[in-house]
Amino acid sequence: MYQFSTAGVLACAGLYVVLYILLQITQDRKEPPPVATSIPFLDPLVGIFTEKVQYLIQLRDKYRLPITTIRLPFTRIYVVNQPALINTIQRQGNAFAFQPVALEFGFLFSGITKKSQAILRNAFSGMGNGFTAGVHKYLHTGSNLDMVSGAATDALSASVPGLAGQMNVGLLHTIQHDLALALTDAMYGPQNPFRDPEVEASWHDFVPGIKHLLYSPFPNITAYRSLQARLRVIAALQQYFRKGGHFQAFPMVREMFDGYMSHGLELEEAAKLDMATLLAMLSSGGIAAFWLMFRVLSNNVVLGNCRQEILANLASNDTLTPDGRRVTVIDLSQLKSKCPTLMAMLNETLRYHSTVISAKNIREDFLLDGQYLLKKDAMLMIPGPVVHYDAAIWGLDADLFNHRRFLFPASARKRLVNTSNFRPFGAGVTMCPGRHFSTNAMVSLAAMMLLQFDVKPKDGAWKIPSTNNADLWNAMPKPDWDVEVDILPRKDAEAVEWKFVWGAQNSMG
Ligand code: HEM
Ligand SMILES: *[C@@H]1O[C@H](CO)[C@@H](O)[C@H](O)[C@H]1NC(C)=O
Ligand SMILES: *[C@@H]1O[C@H](CO)[C@@H](O)[C@H](O)[C@H]1NC(C)=O
Ligand SMILES: *[C@@H]1O[C@H](CO)[C@@H](O)[C@H](O)[C@H]1NC(C)=O
Ligand SMILES: *[C@@H]1O[C@H](CO)[C@@H](O)[C@H](O)[C@H]1NC(C)=O
């Protein structure tokens, strides 16, 4: 026994020495300094998987380095911590050395065949995010954005009133469901596959499998159930395109689909690619809207101010209903410009809760800022929280939630929302193209709920959930448990018939 454990210790010590030497000789002196580890390669692996983005924040606080190297088995990650350096990287734009990860992730999540992958890689050669160009084109600003935001508002107007009187429901579950239906209705039109509750349920069964697709050597064993669920969503998408649902959709859906087909993909394969857009569309919006509502509802001053601003600045009394009730029309397209409290809450919610990590693959050796060697095939990571919690940018209360933070005068705000300081949607050429659409839908949902309901926590007090089990890949952290609430119609609002519209559609019957 004694003999055995001595041998064990010696073997471990030997392994340690080998790993240590391996680490030293494979680390170039010009690379960003490596973080010290007690067990080379394994320490950071455990750290990232157990603490997730918190691990990166801890490293920043411990070493205070502008950029560091984390050595993992078979790969290295450079983690950027300093806003000035983040700016330098952003200025490289789409430089060949920095390849967006969207294309590879899109392939992975959608499960298209090797053959289709080769076709698309060839079609999008040299432009890593050509794959997402359709989303950038259609959701940027202007009339298309207004059209799709209006459609989402209509879907919310139809579903949100139905929440009245629901008791003991999960706030996250409720928000996620209504928002997902509104976003997918607005995108896919009358034949929206997510109208089928089985498809929505399958989607939720698929999502936990994503981390297996990213990190597991055998995803179809370790995430069997999730990948079966994905097949059901894919089948629904294939059916949708087969039946021509996309002819009645937001033009983006049809154009992207036609694009994939024109490169030579089969219909079955082209349909699968919508899994990638759906993931971008559904993964963070519902969670962000949950945190926004949690923050607004749990602060009576903020809640009162939000309601007051919406009523005072967006409402107009048009008509009376036949039974004499007043119809109050709320133009939600004006939330952004006329409801500073709600918009400031959204930004502070994103700043405080975001767990975003922007990632890029290094395609060739690159000297960053004239001093740091970034090696080919490594990954570059910019964790949002390290800048979101930086006291040099946000002041000494950086690690507190401050509902007044974004109520600064516009001049001061401009500096703060610069993407080197505020990056819940990423930055640069790959910055989230869905940010305006999702912002519009999130604040519309919030406004509708705030005016129509009193939402009360079942436990009497708002207890904030932890996020220890949240997925590393998600830009917003899913709470570890749902917050149970009662949704009660508001007494003083019952005499009113609400009509929620998006801008010019005001005149609609
Ligand atoms: C609160 C909601 C959302 C958050 C926090 C969010 C966040 C992000 C982030 C952090 C990125 C990566 C940016 C980068 O690498 O620089 C991203 C990319 C993307 N997002 Fe969003 N997103 C949201 C909603 C949406 C919606 C509703 C859509 C579509 C309708 C969407 C579509 C996309 C697409 C297509 C990309 C890939 C862009 C590219 O690489 O070219 N997102 N999003
Ligand atoms: C798992 O996936 C691989 C490739 O995607 C495939 O070749 C293999 O047959 C699958 N195994 C099972 C058990 O489904
Ligand atoms: C709408 O009518 C009600 C009651 O007549 C009034 O209290 C409210 O201020 C009016 N709102 C607007 C925007 O005119
Ligand atoms: C919130 O952040 C966005 C950038 O994501 C910015 O354009 C907007 O002005 C900010 N609004 C407020 C109220 O801070
Ligand atoms: C953000 O700030 C950096 C330096 O602080 C500056 O170089 C950059 O132009 C700013 N970006 C925008 C969009 O204002």
Image (cartoon, rainbow, N blue to C red):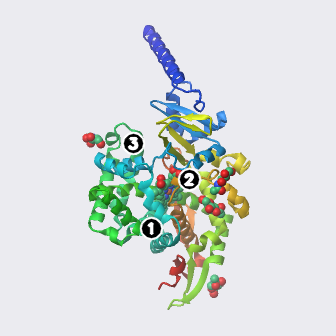
Respond yes or no on whether mark 1 lies under 8 Å from ligand 1: no
Q: Residue drawn 48% across and 69% down?
A: 163
Instruction: Give the class, few, some or many, for how many residues have Cα within 10 Å of label 1's Cα (few <14, many ≥20).
Output: many
Residue tagged by mark 2? 428
* Disc 3/disc 2 C-alpha distance (Å): 28 Å
409 on left or right of 273: right
Q: CA distance from mark 1 to mark 2?
A: 28 Å
Disc nearer the start of the sequence (3/2): 3
**Does 169 appear above or below 92?**
below
Whichever of labels 1 and 2 marks the residue nearer the N terminus, that label is 1
Mark linked to residue 212: 3
Tag 1 residue: 182
Q: Does the Cβ of the disc 3 residue fall within 8 Å of ligand 2?
A: no
Residue count near mark 3 (Cα–Cα under 10 Å), binned few <14, some 14–19, many ≥20: some
Q: Nearer the viewer, residue 331 or 458?
A: 331
**Residue at position x 58%, y 45% from top?**
89
Above or below residue 149? Residue 111 is above
Residue 185 in picture, x, y percent from top left: 41, 68
Q: Alpha carbon of mark 1 to alpha carbon of mark 3: how far?
A: 29 Å
Give the amino acid at mark 3: His
The three-letter code of the residue at mark 1 reads Ala
Q: Quadrant of the N terminus?
A: top left
Please give the label number shown on residue 133: none
**In contact (CB < 8 Å): disc 1 and disc 3:** no
Q: Secondary structure at mark 1?
A: helix
x and y percentages locating residue 502 in the rendered image? 52, 76
Q: Is mark 2 within 8 Å of ligand 1?
A: yes
Residue 426 visible at all: no
Left or right: where 303 falls relative to 499: right
Residue 323: image x %, image y %?
Answer: 51, 90
Seen from the viewer's position, the closer of residues 106 and 37 is 106
